[in-house]
Image: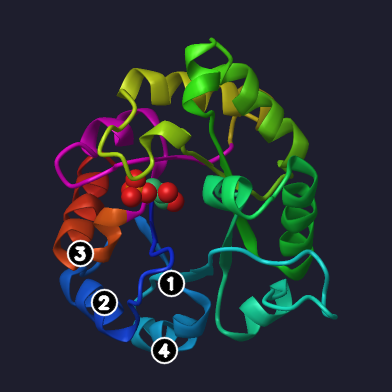
């Protein structure tokens, strides 16, 4: 089954966007996941009740509790209705100091608590231009993947740039990920996915992790319909 996930990042969207998305999606043959900012998880969860759309956090701390100002634990995400959590997004790695080691600890903590991690991997522009893309992807997967993870391939140079990877590049990355993580691993593509360019990615991966376009209910619903069309 394809999965279309929306990462709302630090945009102040909550109940209204969730309600608008629900209103545009009827019975589906694909899985849908929304990941709003922490403070809106509960209201988005209420808006999604009965819709079959899953709720996820955008990050977590690996410890169960303690003096970790600003952090949330897997248990807290579960308590707000989450079933999934994004882990190791490149924005966390590049702006907040997440490392392969801390990402691995977060994945482990999420799995132990019963959350499904969406483990993000992807090379920078420099790594791609130096011919290291597949090696970087493999090393990130080997460092943090555990059975039960979904893996999102998000090349850093494609995120928020309007310059999506080619479907061939995404297919190669998905193959690298499945060699490293196991052939049945669910692999998503993320990076400037929109309603116009999404269809080819659904032929070569198991779905999409959508940023900017997930903030527009109509665009997000169109991406979900494209995933259904290729299922
Ligand atoms: P954009 O779709 O805005 O490029 O963001 C992708 C992303 O980072 C999803 O996690």
Residue at left 34%, top 86%?
Answer: 47
Q: Position of residue 9 (x, y in %)?
A: 43, 63
Q: Position of residue 99 (x, y in %)?
A: 73, 44
Q: Give the range drawn in magenta.
A: 185-211
Residue 109 in the figure: left or right of residue 199: right
Viewer-side residue, 14 vs 53: 14
First-in-chain label (2 vs 1): 2
Residue topped by disc 3 = 216
How far apart are the alpha carbons under marks 4 and 1?
Answer: 10 Å
Q: Which of marks 4 and 2 is nearer the N terminus?
A: 2
Q: Are marks 2 and 1 in contact (CB under 8 Å)?
A: yes
Secondary structure of the residue carrying numbered label 2: helix
- CB of residue at label 1: within 8 Å of ligand 1? no
Residue at 72 percent across and 63 percent down: it is 110
Q: What element carries label 3?
A: loop
N-term mark: 4 or 3: 4
Asked if 230 appears above or below 47 in the picture, the reply is above
171 in the magenta segment: no
Can you say which quadrant of the picture contains the C terminus?
top left
Q: Position of residue 117 (x, y in %)?
A: 62, 56
Q: Picture coordinates of residue 224 (x, y %)?
A: 25, 54
Which residue position holds label 2?
Answer: 17
User: Is the residue under label 3 in contact with that under label 4 (CB below 8 Å)?
Assistant: no
Using the image as rendered, state which of residue 49 and residue 162 is in the foreground: 162
Q: Mark 4 points at which residue?
A: 43
Indicate which disc, 1 or 3, sits on the residue closer to the N terminus.
1
The answer to whether residue 204 is left or right of residue 143 is left
The quarter of the picture where residue 35 lies is: bottom left
């Amino acid at each position: 089954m394809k999965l279309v996930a929306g990462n709302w990042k630090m945009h102040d969207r909550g109940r209204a966007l969730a309600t608008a998305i629900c209103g545009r999606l009827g019975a589906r043959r694909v899985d849908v996941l929304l990941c709003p900012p922490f403070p809106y998880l509960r209201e988005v969860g209420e808006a999604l009740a009965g819709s079959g759309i899953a709720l996820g956090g955008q990050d977590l701390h690996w410890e169960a509790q303690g003096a970790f100002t600003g952090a949330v634990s897997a248990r807290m995400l579960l308590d707000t209705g989450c079933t999934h959590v994004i882990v190791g997004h490149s924005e966390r790695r590049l702006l907040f100091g997440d490392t392969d080691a801390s990402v691995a600890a977060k994945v482990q903590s999420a799995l132990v608590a019963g959350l499904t991690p969406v483990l993000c991997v992807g090379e920078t522009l420099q790594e791609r231009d130096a011919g290291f893309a597949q090696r970087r992807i493999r090393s990130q997967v080997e460092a943090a993947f555990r059975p039960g993870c979904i893996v999102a391939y998000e090349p850093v140079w494609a995120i928020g740039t309007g310059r999506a990877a080619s479907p061939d590049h995404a297919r190669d990355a998905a193959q690298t990920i499945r060699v490293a993580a196991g052939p049945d691993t669910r692999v998503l593509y993320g990076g400037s996915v929109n309603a116009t360019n999404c269809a080819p990615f659904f032929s070569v991966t198991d779905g999409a992790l959508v940023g900017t376009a997930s903030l527009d209910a109509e665009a997000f619903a169109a991406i979900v319909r494209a995933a259904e069309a290729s299922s």
